[in-house]
Image (cartoon, helix red, strand yellow):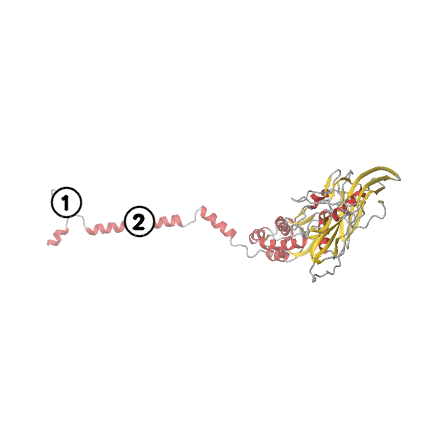
Amino acid sequence: MTEAQASSRPSSGAGGTRRVDRGSIYLGVSGALLGLSGLLAAAYFLVGGEPSTASAATSERRQDAGPPVADDGGLGKAVETALAGDVSVSAGAITERMRWSDLGAVVDPADLARAGRRSHDLDALRKAGALPVKLDRAKAIAALTALKGKVDRAPVDAYLDLEARAIRDDKAGYGVDVYASLGVVEAAARAGAPAVELATVTLPARTTKASIGIEDISHVLGTFRTEFAVADKERNFNLKLAASKLNGFVLAPKAEFSFNKVVGDRTEKEGYKIAHVITAGEMVDGLAGGTCQISTTLFGASFFAGMEILDATPHSRPSTYVTLGLDSTVVYPTQIYAEVDLKMRNPYDFPVVIHYRVARGEAVVEILGKKRPWDQVAFEREIEEEIPYTSEERPDETLPVGFISLDQPGFNGYRAIRYRKFYKGKKLVKTDKWRLYYKPVKEYLRVGTSVDPNAEIPDEDKAHHLPKAPKQGNGRLVQ
């Protein structure tokens, strides 16, 4: 036996170690691996060969839903055709024909898929309000806003039509509520409605007939008229500005009226201009000249309307535009001048309103309201004393010696009594009485004092505005 044969055999002996053949080990490992592969293959076919219950259910749902329905039986086309049709859109007094698509109505794909599976009956979907339609919000808002511009109507305030002596009633306005109308339009579109009424809101008037504070202006309780020179533009402007503060003023029953409070400050800030005014009995230029003619004309109308006279002061000299005894001057309080005001009270149980008009050389006032309780109201004047005027010379160094110029003509003063008499029929039922005093107007003469032989005599053509002397001591006017 060779050495190789001897080494290939197992040896045994006392205390000896058993040797294992290497080829046998490799063969055993290979067999084990082969068996494991079989087990893995069996497990694969056992687990993966058939789907689980959950996977089967998921697969079934996917097969049922699938992608959005492509073949909806023509429902989508039918809805698109319907949206291209007309609808009558109404709001307030406006009705217009529009297409649903112009109102922003479009096909809703998701709803179309569901509706396609349920029913292809367009009429049934209309009756159920379930047409697969939604709104393109931006397009719908744009369309409704455009309609709003046509539909909206501003409220009309109540107002006094003083020329017609009528009270015009207020009228509420209305407007389209764009965002509230979105839901209305969408619901109508889903129902395929032939018409839709947009949501509107009421816009109340700011001034109502009830809030004006007077119910009847159909009667003239008293009126008065004075004249002015149209050519004096600054003074005319002041007349119109002051009258505008009074026109439409409502005086409640038993309420008091103050000319200075209602007309307010007479300053350049308020727009008044320089014009002729009477100051200390002399005609000079001053701010807001002409306001006294507005107060005087109002006084005359209020006198015949039966207003209770609380405070009225005649001018310091008789006026050129009103009969002596029917004037009332006013002075707005300043640091220089104390307040002189025209104050009255409405004695009636109904309100009255002042209607003032200044135009074409006339200032006209009406006191409007219900019918006054008097048949006649009379003005009477009695002159108790006529006071002669005085003269005053004013030296002027620019004029030659001996030349005299009339700066202001004089006018006599008067003490007089003014009466107001109320009649029912021919019966005198009430008399008011006032004592009046008009200072004489001083005559001012400009006298030359210059000895210069070259001093020139001016070419003067002054227009002096003075009242006419009463033709008789007593006077009477009746309304």
Q: Measuring 14% from the left and 50% from the top, which residue is drawn there?
A: 9
Q: Quadrant of the C terminus?
A: top right
- Give x and y (percent) for residue 456: 71, 61
Residue ID for mark 1: 17
Disc marking residue 286: none
Between 28 and 308, the one nearer to me in the picture:
308
Q: Please tell me whether residue 374 is drawn above or below residue 164 in the rendered image.
A: above
Q: Residue furthest right?
A: 426
- Give x and y (percent) for residue 433: 81, 38
Q: In the picture provided, is 66 more to the left or to the right than 3? A: right
Circle 2 sits in a helix, a strand or a loop, which is it? Answer: helix
**Do callouts 1 and 2 mark residues in contact (Cβ within 8 Å)?**
no
Q: Residue furthest bottom?
A: 454
Amino acid type indicated by mark 2: Leu
Circle 1 sits in a helix, a strand or a loop, which is it? Answer: loop
Q: Residue furthest top?
A: 429
Q: In the picture provided, is 245 more to the left or to the right than 476? A: left
Which comes before the other along the chain, label 1 or label 2? 1
Between 289 and 376, the one nearer to me in the picture:
289
Q: Report whether residue 358 is seen.
A: yes
Q: Quadrant of residue 310?
A: top right
Amino acid type indicated by mark 1: Thr
Between 341 and 38, the one nearer to me in the picture:
341
- Give x and y (percent) for residue 303: 79, 43
- Give x and y (percent) for residue 258: 72, 42
Q: In the picture provided, is 359 more to the left or to the right than 265? A: right
How crowded pointer 1 is (Cα within 10 Å; few <14, some 14-19, many 20+) is rated as few
How crowded pointer 2 is (Cα within 10 Å; few <14, some 14-19, many 20+) is rated as few
Query: What separation in Å lies between label 1 and label 2 (alpha carbons)?
Result: 32 Å
Residue ID for mark 2: 36
Between 73 and 47, the one nearer to me in the picture:
73
